[in-house]
Image: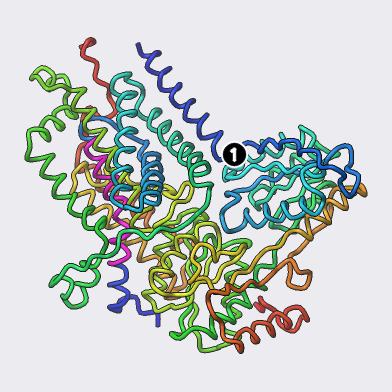
């Protein structure tokens, strides 16, 4: 009975882990862009909530999930621009304005949920699983890896795309330069503020989509404060991943797999108090952060506002 | 420059606080004075009874908070509407210091009875109640009225959630084809733990060979992890699922997508997934609310510990007619309820 290493369990962990990792991937990859350019956006959680709500609302009212997704991305963009305005143009302390943005998103999404949806929890028929022919026929693994909804595939495809954009394009070079040394970038003709506006907006759009991945694809409903901490873990995953998309992927998968593992440990009746089991993913993340993060360096200008006139 | 930057940040933070503060607390719906009905049957008292309730989640959570709010509405109806009984509520008060402030505000602004509907509010209530000796307070789920601490104006109430859990465990075990049941609990404590343990015992009582798998997510609100827990139960072969707290909406969706059945508790959860929910244990608080109002009118403001049971009709088993349950299984459930009421069955034997 309590055989943790049976095929069912291992495949189960993999499948659940992949689904759990999806919102973290969108949010953390978006945050990677933002932080690589030097802006720490702690408001991801609030943007996710607004994305989840607006995506769900538009999905329900129009009956078209793609319009919902678009709405979530648009609302994410608006909130990203808000963060950029406050932290880049007004040069407010990033930590404080990010927490402000989170509370703003939490409050506003709850308020709109009460008014626009009358606070009723109702489910929607979300994005359905798409079986990828041939690949899904691979014994055992095929079903677990290649039978997910489109939002899951997009999340994983986002990793190589983000990696390419950051490391192989001129835009990516500007982003890294601005995050490392905005003064030099500026002297070389890079528009520091424009780059930061762009990255924080990308972060906002992806955080909005992260929220919609919950309300339109994975859980298919909206409830107040439904993200319950995912956005903050996503910020931690950026540090964990050393500000690199592949590192973020590794972190998101590790965290989600351990979460899936602890659920299986409970299902199998292995005698560990549930409180300890629930803590496992967090403890592991803290340990990994403590040991791994020293090997990579944060963008030198992270959290530092750029002021052309003063330099 | 520096100070200005800081001011902007603080201003933004304050704006956010403002929005977030006014949203979930949904200020006690200003009760509009009821239009004067011509000739009410009973002469309305000059001053309506003023009742306030503070709840951790929303009044539409299909669970703990909704059950209490609906109970209050029924009592209000029976008392003759808003003219005779005013209800103010603060929902979404997951933050205890905020809830404590709300309790104090309601008492200070002349509410006759204040319900602190959450076990996390107890410690605060014990400190607040002595400051308002004219106000009746009640809280749950707990049986501690703080009399040992010299507090005289606090009632306590608790749902014997294990009773309905036991009965639904019986139904689930007998309905299951795979012989595997999954329970997705939130935090291993209080009302949730009573329910989960009762369900597990009921299942084993009806069918000793059944496998009951139990998980806890460690959160009352983590919908995503609750959905993952339900997925895990289904991968482990479960075809009957249950769980407790407002986060179960995530798990109900998973049950629906996978053709599994769901058993609800605290409130009727069938509207979320009409083809999926077999039955729900409903908490009917009206009896307790009425007794507390009655006691207050006689000057008894605290000291009573109430329980919701099948016997006092505080617990109700409600089937969802859209999901057929065989008659012999319904009979077994009725027997279990009778056994619990007669004291022949102990839903929590160890």
Quadrant containing the N terminus of chain A is bottom left
Q: Residue at horizontal 28%, vertical 72%?
A: A11
| B62 displayed left or right of B77 | left
* Residue B286 drawn above or below residue B264: above
Residue B178: % across, % down: 43, 85
In the image, farthest residue toward the front:
B38
Percent position of residue B299, x then y: 91, 47
* Residue A287 visible, this angle: no
- Count the marks: 1
Residue found at x 68% / y 51%: B117
Q: Where A140 sits versus A212, above or below?
A: below
Main SS of the magenta part reads helix
**Callout 1: SS:** loop
Asked if the stretch drawn in magenta spans residue A248, the answer is no
Q: Mark 1 points at which residue?
A: B25
The answer for which chain carries disc 1 is B
In the shown orientation, is residue A19 left or right of residue B97? left
Residue drawn at x 53%, y 48% as measured from the top left:
A119
Name the image quarter holding the C terminus of chain A. top left
Please name whichever residue, A79 or A259, is drawn nearer the observer in this view of the structure: A79
Identified at 43% across, 37% down, the residue is A105
On the image, the x and y values in percent for residue A127 come to 30, 59
Q: In the displayed structure, does residue B228 sit left or right of residue A187?
A: right
Residue A179 seen anywhere in this rendered image of the structure = yes
Residue A165: quadrant of the picture: top left
Span shown in magenta:
A15-34
Q: Crowdedness of circle 1 by 10 Å Cα count: few (<14), some, many (20+)?
A: many
Residue A14 located left or right of residue B15: left
Q: Nearer the viewer, residue B11 or A114?
A: A114
Q: Position of residue B257 (x, y in %)?
A: 39, 69
Q: Tell me, yes or no, whether the highlighted magenta stretch contains residue A17.
A: yes
| Colour scheme | rainbow
């Amino acid at each position: 009975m309590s055989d943790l290493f049976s095929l069912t369990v291992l495949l189960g962990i993999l499948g659940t882990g992949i689904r759990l990792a999806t919102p973290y991937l969108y949010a953390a990859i978006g945050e990677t862009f933002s932080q690589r350019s030097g802006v720490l956006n702690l408001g991801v959680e609030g943007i996710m909530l607004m994305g989840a709500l607006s995506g769900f609302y538009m999905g329900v009212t129009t009956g078209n999930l793609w319009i919902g997704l678009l709405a979530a991305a648009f609302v994410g963009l608006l909130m990203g621009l808000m963060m950029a305005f406050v932290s880049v143009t007004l040069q407010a302390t990033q930590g404080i304005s990010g927490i402000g943005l989170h509370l703003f998103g939490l409050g506003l999404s709850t308020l709109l949920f009460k008014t626009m949806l009358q606070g009723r929890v109702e489910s929607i028929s979300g994005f359905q699983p798409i079986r990828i022919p041939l690949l899904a026929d691979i014994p055992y693994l095929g079903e677990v890896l290649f039978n997910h909804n489109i939002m899951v595939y997009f999340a994983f495809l986002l990793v190589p795309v983000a990696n390419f954009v950051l490391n192989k394009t001129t835009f990516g070079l500007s982003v890294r330069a601005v995050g490392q040394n905005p003064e030099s970038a500026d002297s070389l003709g890079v528009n520091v503020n424009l780059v930061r506006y762009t990255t924080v907006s990308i972060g906002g759009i992806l955080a909005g989509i992260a929220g919609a991945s919950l309300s339109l694809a994975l859980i298919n409903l909206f409830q107040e404060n439904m993200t319950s901490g995912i956005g903050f873990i996503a910020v931690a995953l950026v540090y964990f991943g050393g500000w690199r998309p592949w590192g973020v992927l590794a972190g998101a998968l590790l965290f989600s797999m351990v979460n899936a593992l602890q659920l299986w440990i409970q299902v199998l009746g292995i005698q560990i108090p549930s409180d300890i089991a629930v803590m496992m993913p967090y403890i592991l993340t803290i340990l990994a952060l403590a040991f791994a993060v020293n090997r990579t360096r944060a963008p030198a200008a992270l959290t530092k506002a750029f002021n052309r006139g003063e330099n | 420059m520096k100070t200005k930057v800081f001011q902007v940040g603080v201003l933004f933070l304050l704006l956010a606080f403002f929005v977030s503060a006014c949203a979930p607390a949904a200020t006690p719906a200003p009760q509009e004075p009821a239009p004067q009905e011509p000739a009410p049957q009973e002469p309305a008292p000059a001053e309506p009874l003023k009742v306030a309730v503070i709840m951790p989640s929303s009044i539409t959570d299909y669970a703990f908070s909704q059950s209490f709010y609906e109970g209050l509405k029924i009592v209000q109806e029976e008392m003759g509407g808003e003219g005779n009984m005013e209800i103010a509520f603060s929902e979404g008060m997951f933050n205890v210091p905020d809830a404590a402030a709300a309790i104090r505000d309601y008492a200070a602004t002349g509410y006759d009875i204040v319900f602190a509907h959450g076990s996390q509010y107890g410690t605060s209530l014990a400190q607040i109640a002595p400051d308002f000796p004219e106000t009746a307070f009640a809280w749950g789920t707990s049986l501690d009225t703080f009399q040992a601490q010299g507090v005289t104006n606090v009632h306590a109430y608790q749902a014997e959630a294990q009773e309905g859990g036991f009965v639904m465990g019986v139904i689930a075990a007998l309905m299951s084809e795979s012989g595997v049941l999954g329970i997705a609990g939130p935090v291993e404590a209080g009302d949730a733990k009573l329910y989960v343990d009762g369900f597990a015992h009921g299942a084993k009582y009806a069918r000793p060979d059944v496998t009951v798998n139990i998980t806890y997510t460690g959160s009352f609100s983590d919908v995503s992890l609750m959905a993952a827990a339900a997925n895990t139960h289904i991968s482990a072969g479960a075809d009957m699922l249950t769980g407790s707290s407002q986060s179960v909406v995530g798990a109900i969706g998973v049950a629906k997508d996978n053709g599994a059945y769901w058993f609800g508790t605290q409130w009727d959860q069938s509207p979320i997934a009409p083809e999926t929910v077999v039955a729900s244990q409903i908490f009917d608080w009206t009896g307790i609310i009425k007794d507390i109002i009655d006691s207050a009118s006689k000057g008894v403001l605290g000291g009573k510990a109430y329980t919701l049971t099948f016997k006092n009709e505080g617990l109700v088993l409600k089937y969802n007619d859209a999901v057929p349950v065989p008659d012999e299984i319904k009979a077994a459930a009725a027997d279990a309820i009778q056994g619990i009421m007669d004291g022949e069955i102990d839903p929590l034997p160890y």
